[in-house]
Image (tube, rainbow, N blue to C red):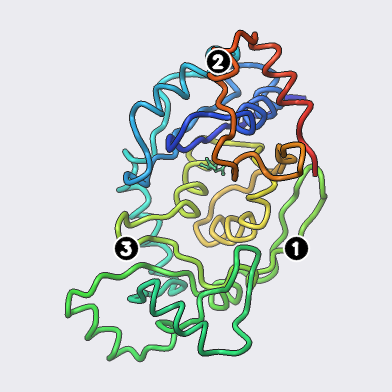
């Protein structure tokens, strides 16, 4: 049975074999039907995203035989929508402003012997969560730049226990402490991957979110945000990641082969699809 699904690349480089695999998983889950396969460009980080990479995404996906409906949603055009989502979280009192620099955080982590760690490393040590109301207001008024962080325990208290379903792993209990107080709105762009992705998946009525295993744990955060924002809950399919012969993730390698490099070397779209589908390991 097919589902409405999506492929959501960031145009910060050329599509490589790992992206091709991810796109093909979504395309197959969508029943190879352009009405069901949503392409979304996740380009909120203007320092990393480039127009030529976006053009290359369209070209490479077309070359692979994938089709989608127009217009394509581009996250850079939706900052006002994400700001409205942030306001809703503010009204629930589950986010707080964070003035910390990267250095403040590193120093605090180095000071504490048992800094909690999550799947992506040390968690935010809660420095700005502990500010008094007066301290917070003074710093806001001084014009110091700030991000917004989720108050993970306040959020958990508000949502109560939550679950989500992964097609490969079954029902998963949300662990709100796994990522700690993640950034929901960055200082520079006023949103974050986590906030934008849950708002857009709902706006595009996505039923099945297919993406790599590397984002498996992020789904805990997404499920919490969906609940806080009153958004529908899709199903997830986190697929295996492509690795090279030595087991290293392709995306981490500087020489990850771009889809167009295979094309330029004379391979057909079918051969590239086969190569992508042969490579994943768990
Ligand atoms: N934009 C993300 C990436 O390119 C994918 C996010 C997602 O599928 O949820 O890695």
Labels 2 and 3: the sequence-earlier one: 2
Q: Which of marks 1 and 3 is in front?
A: 3
Q: Which of 110 and 224 is in front in this view?
A: 110
For label 3, being within 8 Å of ligand 1 is answered no
**Quadrant location, the N terminus:** top right
Q: In this view, does 223 lie above or below 30?
A: below
Query: Depth-wise, is mark 2 or mark 1 nearer the camera?
Result: 2
Rendered image quadrant of residue 30: top right
* In this picture, residue 197 sits left or right of residue 100: right
Compared to residue 26, the image places residue 209 above or below, namely below
Q: Name the residue under label 3.
A: 187
Residue 6: image x %, image y %? 58, 32
Q: Mark 2 points at which residue?
A: 67
For the residue carrying disc 3, how many other residues have a C-alpha within 10 Å: few (<14), some (14-19), or many (20+)? some
- Packing grade of label 2 (10 A; few <14, some 14-19, many >=20) is some
Q: Is residue 170 rendered to the left or right of residue 261?
A: right
* Residue 248, quarter of the rendered image: top right
- Residue 173 bears which disc, if any? 1
Q: Which residue is drawn at 39% across and 22% down?
A: 55
Of marks 1 and 3, which one's residue comes earlier in the chain? 1
- How far apart are labels 2 and 1 at the CA level? 35 Å
Dot 1 falls on a residue whose secondary structure is: strand
In percent of width and height, residue 97 lies at 35, 74
Q: Which of 212 and 171 is in front in this view?
A: 212
Quadrant in which the C terminus is drawn: top right
State which mark lies toward you, 2 or 3: 3
Which mark sits nearer the N-terminus, 2 or 1? 2
């Amino acid at each position: 049975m097919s589902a409405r699904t999506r492929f959501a690349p960031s145009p910060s480089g050329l599509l490589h074999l790992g992206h091709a695999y991810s796109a093909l998983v979504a395309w197959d889950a969508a029943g190879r039907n352009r009405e069901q396969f949503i392409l979304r460009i996740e380009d909120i980080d203007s320092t990393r995203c480039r127009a030529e990479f976006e053009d290359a995404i369209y070209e490479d996906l077309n070359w692979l035989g994938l089709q989608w409906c127009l217009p394509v949603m581009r996250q850079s055009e939706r900052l006002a929508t994400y700001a409205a989502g942030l306001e809703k979280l503010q009204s629930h009192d589950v986010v707080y402003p964070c003035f910390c620099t990267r250095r403040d955080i590193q120093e605090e982590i180095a000071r504490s012997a048992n800094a909690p760690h999550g799947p992506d490393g040390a968690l935010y040590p809660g420095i700005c969560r502990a500010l008094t109301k007066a301290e917070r207001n003074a710093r806001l008024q001084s014009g110091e730049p700030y991000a917004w962080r989720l108050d993970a325990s306040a959020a958990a208290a508000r949502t109560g226990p939550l679950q989500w379903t992964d097609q490969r792993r079954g029902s998963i209990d949300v662990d709100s402490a796994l990522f700690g107080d993640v950034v929901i709105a960055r200082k520079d762009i006023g949103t974050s991957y986590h906030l934008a992705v849950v708002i857009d998946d709902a706006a595009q009525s996505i039923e099945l979110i297919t993406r790599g295993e590397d984002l498996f744990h992020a789904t805990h955060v997404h499920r919490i945000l969906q609940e806080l924002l009153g958004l529908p809950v899709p199903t997830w399919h986190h697929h295996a990641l492509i690795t090279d012969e030595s087991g290293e993730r392709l995306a981490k390698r500087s020489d990850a082969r771009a889809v167009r490099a295979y094309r330029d070397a004379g391979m057909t779209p079918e051969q590239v699809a086969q190569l992508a589908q042969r490579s994943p390991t768990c």
